Amino acid sequence: MPLLRPLTRRCFASRGPVAALLLALSVAAPALGAPAGAQPASAEQPPGQRAQGKRPAARRSSAGDEGGSRAARGAGANGKTADRASKKRAARRDETSRTARGGTAAEADERKPLSKGAPNRGRLTGAVRLRSSRHLKTREGARTWGLPVLVKALRRASFQVAKKHGDSALLVGDLSARAGGRLDGHNSHQTGRDADVGFYVVNSKGKTLRMDRFVAFDDKGDAIGLPGARFDDKRNWALVEALLQDRQAGVKYLFVTDALRARLLAYAAKKRVPAELRSRAAAAMMSPRDADLHNDHFHIRVACPPSMRAACVEESLARPACDADAAKKPLDAAAAPAAPADVTAHAAAAPAAPADVTAHAAAAPAPR
């Protein structure tokens, strides 16, 4: 094109038609190098306005990213669900394998609460431990394993006494060993259904005394060996009442001396306790034969829970006094238990308890 410019000037000088044609070609020549279809920006859009084609593309990109993240999250959730299902299937296969080997059933039996045999010849599985709380104190060195129904009943009863009369702490001695069986100092307490519970004690002014040992009382309610201390009629009756009214507990016996039994029933009558409850208390409270006096504690026994009736023997088994090896004999649920004397006897006479129900060993140190 530079070669055309001198020629153009000469043509203009001649002012001919050829000059005009060359001039037009000269002006149009720079545009011939531009890409086909390209136009000036001013012709495409007015100045100051954005390109309209970019924003929809950005929106489409954002929507695509969001859809991708949702898909990724869905895939992750599905993966986790599949992992959990896989683990459950593997656990079931392992459980089936262990069951085939006999391990799982045995382990489950050991964890399941069960009172096996009679109170004086039995075993215990699935025991729970009674621990001290604000309203209940376990005696130092006590064996406090028992059926859940007994442990919970003691907790509820101690709470009820404290709620009603305040400033109360129930002292609890032995229940059973963790696996049941023979317990030093006792003939019963072998199946998690028995508990020794100390009496509530007050001083001469009626103020509660918190004890760390069992305190024995004479027939007049005076403490033996602890001058000024007395049997707390109010709280001890509240304990009996709470235990008997607890429908979940199933309390069957409350072993105690005849004199203290009569004292509690007299207090209940004085407080106009309904006759039906007094009759139940009279039937439950008794003094067992061939046992200690129970003048320093209640011996509480709950009935066999309905779910355990096939293995649990309600009453203590009869045992000859000369049979020193009786405790070592295997369990025999079919053996005839020694039935107690009429436990529904009226308050006029204390019924006798089953033989050997809770007799403590003769050499057991006091308090028991």
Image (spheres, rainbow, N blue to C red):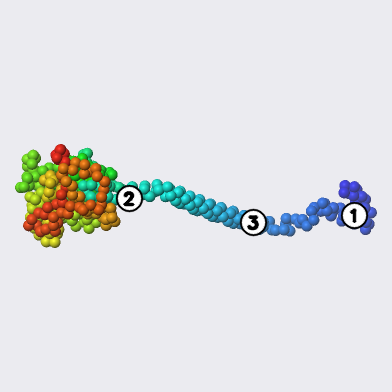
Residue 245 pos. (x, y %): 19, 57
Look at 52% across and 54% down and name the residue there: 78
Q: Nearer the viewer, residue 70 or 39?
A: 70
Query: Residues under labels 2 and 1: Cα distance?
Result: 113 Å
Identify which residue, 91 or 288, lies in the foreground. 288
Q: Nearer the viewer, mark 1 or mark 3?
A: 3
Residue sitting nearer the eye, 55 or 73: 73
Looking at numbered disc 3 in the image, what kind of residue is underneath it?
Answer: Ala
Q: Can residue 9 be spotted in the picture? A: no
Nearer to the camera, 314 or 10: 314
The amino acid type, in three-letter code, at marker 1 is: Leu
Q: Quadrant of residue 276?
A: bottom left
* Residue identified by numbered label 1: 22
* Residue 176, quarter of picture: top left
Q: Which residue is mark 2?
A: 112
Residue contact between numbered discs 1 and 3, judged by CB atoms under 8 Å = no
Left or right side of 355 for 129:
right
Image spot of residue 323 (x, y percent):
18, 43
Q: Which residue is mark 3?
A: 57
What x and y, as percent, mark residue 364? Answer: 16, 39
Element type at mark 2:
loop
Q: What kind of element bears circle 1? A: helix
Answer with mark 2 or mark 3, whichever residue precedes in sequence: 3
Inter-mark Cα distance, 2 to 3: 67 Å
Which one is earlier in the sequence, the residue at label 2 or at label 1? 1
Whole-percent x, y for residue 66 in the image: 57, 55
Circle 2 packing at 10 Å, graded few (<14), some (14-19), many (20+), is few
Query: Where the C terminus falls, by quadrant?
Result: top left
Q: Nearer the viewer, mark 2 or mark 3?
A: 2
Callout 3 crowding tier (Cα within 10 Å): few <14, some 14–19, many ≥20 = few
- Taking the spot 23% from the left edge, 50% from the top edge, the residue there is 118
User: Which residue occupies 38% across, 50% down?
Assistant: 105
